[in-house]
Structure formats: C-alpha cells, structure tokens
Image: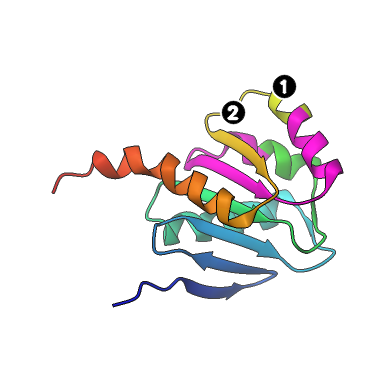
Amino acid sequence: MISRPYYFRYKFTHVIRHESGVVELLCDRDTVLSVEMLEDVLDFCTDLASGELYLLINKRNSFSFSLGAIQLLRKYDSLKALAVFSASQSTHSFLEFFMKMTSTGFELKHMEDRDAALAWLERCRRPFLKKIPA
C-alpha cells in the first residue's frame, strides 16, 4: 500500500499531513497572519500531528506574519522543528536574523528545496519516534 499525505483546507490555509507525521502549511496569497490566526492554525496542525509538531512553512505563495505572530511561533510549546521553504533572499535574511536574535525551543532551518526540507524534518522527528514504546 502506498502512503499518501492527507490534505486539508483550513480557513486561510492548505494543510498537508505527511505520512511521516510532518505537517506542511501553505497560506493563501497575501495573507498576513495575526496572533489569533496563527494560534488557531498551529493548534489545528498540532492536533493533526498528535502533539509533537514538526512543521514545514511553505512560502510558495507570498504571505507574512505580524510581529506578534512571530513572537507566538517562537514560544509555541508543541513546535519541535520548523523548516521554512522559500527561494526568497529576504526570507533567508530574516530567518538568519531571527535565529541570531532570539532563542527558541525548536530546531529552525531555511531551505530552498521543499523535498530537502521535508527530509530534514523527518530526520528531526525520528528521535521522537524511537521514544514511543512498541
């Protein structure tokens, strides 16, 4: 049997739960995520991931985060690893600044290849999977 991802349309986002347990988030074009919007979608993603969130933010569409939403993301307890897929140099520069200026409780990477981002998140998730009793 071939494993397939599960696709959800949730408000202003497309959410993909990959068979590996990684959750991918793609917002509608020109969305500006407020604190409330991001908290709502992160809670939805965490429920899909059964508690431990390994998240790929796919910036294929142009969307952004309010400052409060960025601060929420930094403090979101269920988030264990975050990859941001974007070819944008400004996104890369912002994430470098974000990583230097703030501490997070999760792994964070900017990647220009979506498949590489998914593979990295799956590797991050693997140690968690080993902790689950058989």
x 65%, y 72%: residue:
11
x 57%, y 67%: residue:
15
The tag on residue 104 is 2
| Stretch in magenta | 72-96
Residue 42 screen position, x and y as percent = 56, 54
Which residue is at the front of the view, 38 or 112?
A: 112
Residue 64 screen position, x and y as percent = 80, 52
Which residue is at the front of the view, 30 or 125?
A: 125
Left or right position of 1 against 37: left
* Residue behind mark 1: 100
* SS at badge 2: loop
* SS at badge 1: helix
User: How many angstroms separate mark 1 from mark 2 (CA)?
Assistant: 10 Å
Left or right position of 71 against 123: right
Residue 49 screen position, x and y as percent = 42, 56
Vertically, is 127 above or below 6? Answer: above
- Classify 10 Å Cα crowding around label 1: few (below 14), some (14-19), many (20 and above): few
Q: Is residue 65 magenta?
A: no
x 57%, y 43%: residue:
82
